[in-house]
Image: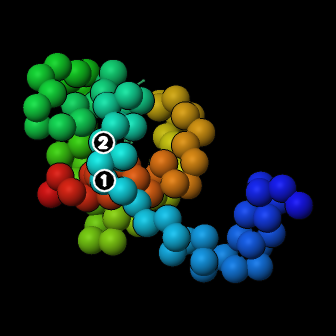
Amino acid sequence: MNRYALTLLLSLLLPGAAEAQSKGDAATGRVIAERWCAACHIVSPEQTSGNADVLTFMTIAGQAGDDLGSLKAFLADPHPVMPDMSLTGQEIRDIVAYIGSLR
Ligand code: HEC
């Protein structure tokens, strides 16, 4: 059995295990945000230019509920105005961890 099949099997058998193994990583989230989101959003306090009509990540961080669950849901099924970037579950967790760190 190859590694992919094994991982898939494990994640089917142990949904909690895959979840626990991959908590969001804010540093990775920042790298993803700077690569994929910075064209439109201001993603960090150091970024000086972006699209003025789009919320900054600092504002998004302040508006998100305590558990950041709404953010995860939004990123899993983005708003039509935003391109569907097909983020993986891990990428979403990383970005959400990063946005959470901006509060
Ligand atoms: C092509 C431009 C563009 C890119 C790239 C982009 N966004 Fe957006 N984003 C928008 C626009 C425009 C809105 C506002 C949508 C609306 O309210 O109608 C938005 C809204 C959001 C919101 C919701 C804010 C709220 O509470 O209303 C979140 C969260 C968000 N973006 C996160 C991200 C993340 C994370 C990335 C990178 C993975 C990203 N965006 C990349 C244009 C973009």
Q: How many labels does the image show?
A: 2
Quarter placement of the N terminus: bottom right
The Cα–Cα distance between marks 2 and 1, rounded to whole angstroms, is: 6 Å
Look at the image and tell me whether residue 70 can be seen. Answer: no
* Mark 1 element type: helix
Residue wearing tag 1: 26
- Residue 62 lies in quadrant: bottom left
Q: For this rendering, which residue is in front, 72 or 55?
A: 72
Q: How is the image coloured?
A: rainbow
Residue wearing tag 2: 30
Residue that appears at 49% across and 40% down? 79
**Within 10 Å of the Cα at label 1, are there few (<14), some (14-19), or many (20+) other Cα atoms?**
some
Q: Do the residues labelled 2 and 1 touch (CB within 8 Å)?
A: yes
- Residue 43 lies in quadrant: top left
Residue farthest right in this picture = 1
Look at the image and tell me whether residue 18 can be seen. Answer: yes
Residue that appears at 44% across and 57% down? 93
**For this view, does 23 lie left or right of residue 65?**
right
Quarter placement of the C terminus: bottom left
The amino acid on which the numbered mark 1 sits, given as a three-letter code, is Ala
Task: Measuring from the top left, give residue 13's x and y in whole percent.
Answer: 77, 79
In this view, 71 is above or below 44? below
In this view, 47 is above or below 19? above
Find residue 76 and name its label.
none
